[in-house]
C-alpha cells in the first residue's frame, strides 16, 4: 500500500509582500524554534517582516535567552508572568523584572499577562493578584501592556478598567473566543487588537466579521508561534513568516490590498511598542 503524501503548501514569500511587516507576538525561545533560529529568521526576512515581538515568560527565560537575539535588531522584547504561572509572580520575580525593564531598552512591554480560566494550572484568585501587580509594574515602568485572556474576557476587562487602564496603551493579544463579544468595549477603552492565525479558519465567522470593525490605527497581526498556525499551514508548527497568511485573510475581509494591510499593521506595531524599524 502506498504511503499518502502531503499536499505541497504555499510558501509565504510567494505573496510578494514588502519588507514592512510585523509579528506582534512570538515565542522564538520555544523548543523547536530557538534551535533553528537563523533558518526561521531567514524565512521571516524573505517574507517581508521587519519587526517581531519576542515574548519572555518571566525573568528567568529573559536572562537565559536575551543574548540569542543580539544579531536581530528588529526583534523587540516583552516580558511578563503568564496567568497559568501566577504563583511564580513573587516579590523576587517582580524585583528582577523591574530591574530588567530599567536596564534594557529592548524590553518594550509588560506581557503577556492577564487571566486564563481554560487551563486549571493556577487558582483564579492567584491569577488576579499576579495580574494586578504586573499592571502596577507597567505603570511604574511606563510600558504598554499585552493581555492574555482565555475564557476570561469579562473578568479581564473588569480588572483593567478597575486599575485605570481605560485610555492607556493596551494590546489584546490573540483576539478570539469570548473576547470577540466585547470588541466594542475594548475599542471604547482605546485599546489595540492583535489578530492571530485562527482568523483563517473557515468556521471562525464571528472573528472574520470582527476584524472589519477594528479601526485601522489599532490593528495588528501575530503568530503566537509555535502555536495557532494559519491556513494553509494549520496543523504544522507556526513561525513568524506564516503571519503573512493571517494578514492576507484580514486584508480580504477588510477589502484592502494585502501589501497595504501588511504595512499598516507593521507600522501600528512599531508605533505601539515604540520599536525601531531596523529590520531583521
Image (spheres, rainbow, N blue to C red):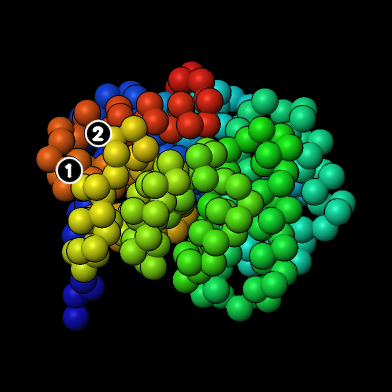
Residue linked to disc 1: 254
Report the disc number at residue 150: none
Q: Nearer the viewer, residue 70 or 189?
A: 189
- Position of 107 with respect to 273 (left or right) is right
Q: Position of residue 97 (x, y in %)?
A: 77, 43
Identify the residue shown where x is 78% and y is 39%: 98
Q: Given this view, does label 1 or label 2 mark the residue nearer the observer? A: 1
Indicate whether 4 appears above or below 98.
Answer: below
Q: Residue at x 30, y 29 (%)?
A: 264
Q: Position of residue 35 (x, y in %)?
A: 57, 46
Tell me the quarter of the picture where residue 258 sits.
top left
Q: Residue at x 71, y 46 (%)?
A: 136
Check disc 2 and report the residue beneath it: 261
Rounded to the nearest angstrom, the CA distance separating label 1 from label 2 is: 9 Å
Q: Residue at x 71, y 34 (%)?
A: 141
Q: Quadrant of the N terminus?
A: bottom left
Dots 1, 2 in contact, CB < 8 A: yes
Element under disc 1 = helix
| Residue 18 picture location, percent across and down | 27, 24
Q: Secondary structure at mark 2?
A: helix
> Can the viewer see residue 88?
yes
Circle 1 packing at 10 Å, graded few (<14), some (14-19), many (20+), is some
> Camera-side residue: 154 or 144?
154
Amino acid at each position: 500500500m502506498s504511503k499518502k503524501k502531503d499536499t505541497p503548501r504555499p510558501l509565504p514569500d510567494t505573496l510578494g509582500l514588502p519588507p514592512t511587516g510585523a509579528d506582534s507576538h512570538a515565542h522564538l525561545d520555544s523548543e523547536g524554534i530557538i534551535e533553528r533560529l537563523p533558518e526561521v529568521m531567514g524565512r521571516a526576512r524573505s517574507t517581508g517582516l521587519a519587526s517581531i515581538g519576542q515574548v519572555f515568560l518571566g525573568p528567568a527565560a529573559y536572562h537565559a535567552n536575551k543574548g540569542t537575539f543580539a544579531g536581530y535588531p528588529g526583534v523587540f522584547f516583552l516580558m511578563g508572568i503568564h496567568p497559568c504561572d501566577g504563583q511564580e509572580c513573587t516579590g523576587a520575580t517582580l524585583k528582577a523584572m523591574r530591574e530588567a525593564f530599567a536596564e534594557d531598552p529592548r524590553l518594550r512591554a509588560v506581557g503577556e499577562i492577564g487571566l486564563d480560566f481554560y487551563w486549571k494550572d493556577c487558582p483564579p484568585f492567584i491569577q488576579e493578584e499576579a495580574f494586578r501587580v504586573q499592571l502596577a509594574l507597567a505603570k511604574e515602568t511606563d510600558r504598554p501592556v499585552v493581555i492574555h485572556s482565555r475564557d476570561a474576557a469579562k473578568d479581564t476587562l473588569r480588572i483593567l478598567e478597575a486599575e485605570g487602564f481605560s485610555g492607556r496603551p493596551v494590546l489584546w493579544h490573540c483576539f478570539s473566543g469570548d473576547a470577540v463579544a466585547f470588541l466594542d468595549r475594548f475599542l471604547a477603552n482605546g485599546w489595540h487588537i492583535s489578530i492571530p492565525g485562527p482568523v483563517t479558519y473557515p468556521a471562525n465567522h464571528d472573528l472574520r466579521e470582527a476584524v472589519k470593525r477594528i479601526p485601522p490605527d489599532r490593528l495588528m497581526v501575530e503568530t503566537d508561534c509555535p502555536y495557532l498556525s494559519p491556513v494553509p499551514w494549520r496543523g504544522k508548527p507556526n513561525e513568524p513568516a506564516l503571519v503573512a497568511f493571517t494578514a492576507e485573510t484580514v486584508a480580504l475581509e477588510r477589502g484592502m490590498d494585502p501589501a497595504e494591510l501588511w504595512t499598516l499593521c507593521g507600522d501600528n506595531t512599531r508605533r505601539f511598542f515604540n520599536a525601531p524599524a531596523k529590520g531583521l
